[in-house]
């Protein structure tokens, strides 16, 4: 489990921190917590990150609360796609990647 | 947003210009990125340009 191996599989080691969860954890809740964190941490300089992290958090919160819509699945993917690579630092990429991975693995196998 | 002769568009605000660089500022990818930039802006921003105080 090193940088090269994980990069080949399309993921990243990042800072090397690993959070281990079991299958009793709700994945939507996990994504909501991650997005809330990134939205809070965003410095606000770049619009896609400042607004996109908040937008993604709002969509996933509504899904978690049971008021999500079918279009939200595509919307999350589109918003996250347009956050990546459009900012000065990589925080918006770091927020967008779990969202995209979640949608692709959970809904679009 | 501008598109340089590379796989993905680059942000203009943080990409240094270099000799021999070919830049496209009106391609389809650029237009889409600019449209989304505006979308992101307008989520939490009122659209009152004609009467905005900041427009002086």
Image (cartoon, coloured by chain):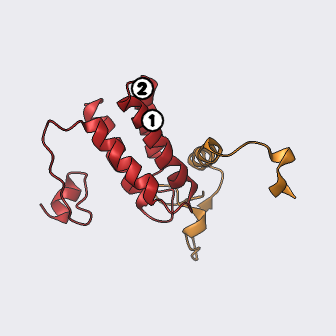
Chain colours: A red, B orange
Within 10 Å of disc 1 (Cα), the crowding (few <14, some 14-19, many 20+) is some
Which of the two labelled residues, at mark 2 and mark 1, occupies the earlier sequence position?
1
Kindly identify which chain the residue marked by label 2 belongs to.
A
Please say if the residues under marks 2 and 1 sit with CB atoms less than 8 Å apart.
yes
* Disc ID at residue A68: 2
Q: Kindly tell me whether residue A10 is visible in this rendering.
A: yes
Estimate the spatial distance between the alpha carbons at disc 2 and disc 1, rounded to whole Å: 7 Å
Residue at figure coordinates x 86%, y 46% from the top left? B51
Residue A92 in picture, x, y percent from top left: 44, 55
The quadrant of the rendering that contains the C terminus of chain A is top left
Residue situated in front as seen by the camera: A108 or B21 = A108
Q: Kindly tell me whether residue B7 is visible in this rendering.
A: no
Residue A17 in picture, x, y percent from top left: 20, 62
Q: Is residue A11 above or below residue A25?
A: below
Q: Which residue is mark 1?
A: A59
**Circle 1 sits in a helix, a strand or a loop, which is it?**
helix
**Circle 2 sits in a helix, a strand or a loop, which is it?**
loop
């Amino acid at each position: 489990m090193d940088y090269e191996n994980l990069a080949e599989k399309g993921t990243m080691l990042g800072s090397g921190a690993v959070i281990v969860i079991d299958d009793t954890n709700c994945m939507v809740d996990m994504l909501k917590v991650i997005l809330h964190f990134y939205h809070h941490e965003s410095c606000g300089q770049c619009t896609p990150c400042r607004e996109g992290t908040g937008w993604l958090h709002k969509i996933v919160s509504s899904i978690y609360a049971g008021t999500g819509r079918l279009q939200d699945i595509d919307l999350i993917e589109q918003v996250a796609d347009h956050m990546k690579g459009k900012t000065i630092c990589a925080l918006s990429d770091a927020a967008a990647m779990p969202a995209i991975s979640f949608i692709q693995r959970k809904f679009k196998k | 947003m501008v598109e340089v002769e590379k796989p993905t568009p680059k942000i203009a605000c943080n990409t240094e210009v270099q000799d021999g660089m070919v830049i496209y500022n009106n391609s389809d990818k650029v237009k889409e990125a600019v449209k989304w930039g505006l979308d992101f802006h307008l989520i939490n921003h009122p659209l009152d340009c004609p009467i905005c105080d900041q427009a002086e």
